[in-house]
Amino acid sequence: MGGAVPEGAQGQAASGKTAEEGEDGASGTRRGRLWLAVGAIVVVAGLIGGVAYAVTSAKLFVPSHRVPSVVGDSTQVAAAAVRSDHFKVRVVGTASSITVPAGSVLSQVPVPTQLLKEGSTIKLTVSSGPPIVDVPSLSSVTGDCNQAASVLASAGFHANCSHANSTSVHAGSVISSSPQDRAPLGSTIQVTVSSGPPVETIPSLTGATCQGATTALQAVGLVAQCQNQYSATIPDGQVVSWSPTGQAPEGSTVVVQVSQGPPPVAVPDIYGDNLQTALTVLQNDGLQAGTISGAGSGRVVKTSPPPGTMVAPGSSIDIVMG
């Protein structure tokens, strides 16, 4: 009897256990649902983050523009054109060109009209101008400007040719050229070709002596070469004539004929002539009688100087009569 539990008490005990278990089960269910909600939020947040990252990385919503053509533009103009479409610009190198001026864009990547997203970089190669090449030597060119221009053209250059006088370089030969050695391909070479010595006006030498003529010619860059010449009209020691006259190239020689008086005459042969005839012959030859000795009514037997001797005009000839 003492160990028996009353029936009412057993019912209460049973009823109390079931209530605890019911509360614990409800609490567990609520916690499970909470974790499910938290997990769902995390998953959704991850998906949103991933999509946002993908959109940002791929620039799915960045506007695109067509790449402008900047080939041939200066780097400043090209940069302004590129940046106006919200692109970036970068010069990646230089290259020589005979068609695109130095400092202008030679090529671009990407090519024009291609669609490109804002913020993308357009790479430019800039021209450094024509290549520097050897200039041919013109020191042996003798064909005037035409030949010099032909030699330069064969090497890819232009010629700007002019002439200048020179006393040391023959006419038609190149005096100088600039630049020498090396220059940009297609550039212009300044060439000076000799037109020979300058032409000088020969002064009048009338009345001058050889020394006076020499001084006058030296003053204009000419050289005098004096030669003697008999003249019956020009006093001894004065210029008779000169050649050439008018003009002559600087450094030329002018031949100057200087009078040495009238030409000599030969003593005539008057042997056997009477005095009157002898005097007439001497006078006709520009001579005169000197001392006359011997018989005046005779004939000439001797003269001094003897016949054939060359004497100056006007000389006296001594006569011996016999």
Image (cartoon, helix red, strand yellow):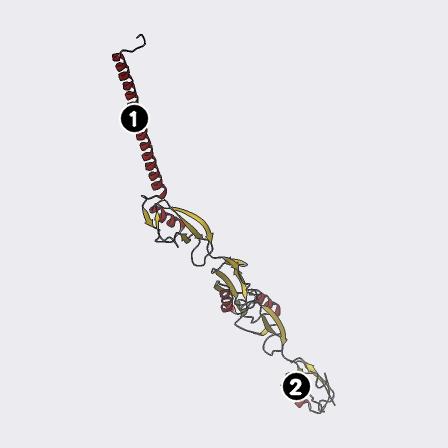
Residue 248 appears anywhere in the view: yes
Residue 291, image x, y percentages: 71, 83
On the image, the x and y values in percent for residue 140 come to: 57, 66
Q: Amino acid at mark 2?
A: Leu
Which residue occupies the foreground of this view, 25 or 124? 25
In the displayed structure, does residue 28 sit left or right of residue 179? left
Q: Earlier in the sequence, mark 2 or mark 1?
A: 1
Direction from residue 34 to residue 262 in the image, left or right: right
At x 44%, y 52%, the residue is: 126
Viewer can see residue 203 = no
- Whether the residues at callouts 2 and 1 have beta carbons within 8 Å, the answer is no
- In the image, residue 106 above or below residue 43: below
Camera-side residue: 114 or 38?
38
Quarter of the rendering containing residue 72: bottom left
Q: Is residue 31 above or below residue 226?
A: above
What is the x, y in percent for residue 159? 48, 63
Camera-nearest label, 2 or 1: 1
Q: Is residue 54 left or right of residue 278?
A: left
Q: Position of residue 254 (x, y in %)?
A: 58, 71
Residue 320 position by quadrant: bottom right
Above-or-below relation of 219 to 25? below
* Quadrant holding the N terminus: top left
| Residue that extends furthest to the left in the rendered view of this protein | 8
* Nearest the eye: 100 or 62: 62
How many other residues sit within 10 Å of disc 1, few (<14), some (14-19) or many (≥20)? few
Q: Quadrant of the C terminus?
A: bottom right
Residue labelled with disc 1: 29
The residue labelled by disc 2 is 282
What SS does tag 1 mark? helix
- The relative height of residue 57 versus residue 220 in the rendered view (above or below) is above
Label 2 sits on a secondary structure element that is helix
Q: Label 1 amino acid?
A: Thr
